[in-house]
Amino acid sequence: MYKTYSLMIKNIIFDFDGVLVDSEILVAKAFVKYMLNFGIETNEKEFANLAGKKTVQVIKILSDKYSIKDQQKFFDDIMEIANNIYKKELTTVKGAYEFVSKSKLNLFIGSNSIKDRILDGLERVELSQYFKPEQVYSFDLVDKPKPDPDIYIKVIEDNNLNKNQTIIIEDSAVGVIAGVSAGIKVIGFTAGGHWHENRNEKELFDAGAFTVTNNYNKIIEIINNN
């Protein structure tokens, strides 16, 4: 059963992809499908390991690795494939809906995705009632995306939050680094489909997460103890 939250923690800032919605694995599927056009056989694990980076950054990495010259076409094609998969297959991460719907804390989102996409995703998985547009922060609202701390600092400053009463939930090293750099405690979260069995949670600890879990019920215990 869900317990009463600690009086110490009053605010949670969620990353979006891989924390609230299980979308990182869908993007990985899009890349795998697309790479076959070049005769390149890959697997979702390779792309899952790039989770947390902006799509344009992933495009650059893969273009350099596989000598793909037209990066704009690569980006446009990937976005079309990913959006089609996203519309058909997007779900919440296991436990996310129950956690959010029962929470009495102040909830925010800080994501490297664009705001319109986040709002659309929230609507698709029926979480939009718990996040007003002004509670959603995206990389297009700040100068620098994660791993820079700008987005988390903006959430804190815009809402006059106390950092000591705030926890961030992140699924990637890029996001953890951003949260820690902002001076906020970060929980590493590994429940998303991109966290395959061979992926080591140590990368989140190494990035600065103070603890790591794959279960939203465990997050409640962590919050109660902080």
Image (tube, rainbow, N blue to C red):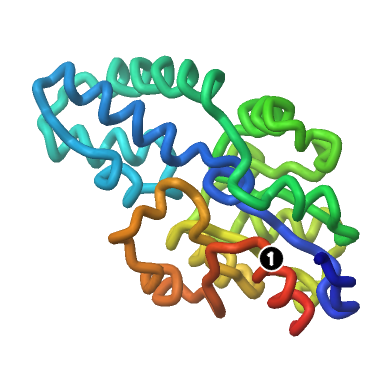
x then y, percent, for residue 28: 35, 36
Which residue is at a point 52% across and 26% down the rendered structure image?
Answer: 89
Q: Element at badge 1?
A: helix
Q: Position of residue 213 (x, y in %)?
A: 54, 69
Q: Does 80 sit left or right of 214 as displayed? A: left
Work out whether residue 147 or residue 26 is closer to the camera in this orientation and state it. 26
Among all residues in the image, which is located at the extreme bottom?
225
Q: Residues within 10 Å of mark 1 (few under 14, many from 20)?
A: some
Q: What residue is drawn where x is 72% and y is 76%?
A: 221
**As shown in the figure, which amino acid type bears the numbered disc 1?**
Asn
Instruction: Residue at 52% x, 72% y: name it.
Output: 212
* Image quadrant in which the N terminus is located: bottom right
Please state if 198 lies on the left or on the right of 208 as rendered: left
Image coordinates for residue 175, horizontal then vertical, percent: 51, 58
Q: Is residue 71 above or below residue 133?
A: above
Which residue occupies 85% across, 54% down? 102
Q: Quadrant of residue 142?
A: top right
Instruction: Report which quarter residue 207 is drawn in.
Output: bottom left
List x then y, in percent, for residue 225: 75, 84
Quadrant location of the C terminus in the rendered image:
bottom right
**What residue sits right under mark 1 in the picture?**
217
Q: Is residue 129 left or right of residue 77?
A: right
State the count of labels: 1
Nearest to the observer: residue 89 or residue 189: 89
Q: In the rendered view, would you say 175 is above or below 87?
A: below
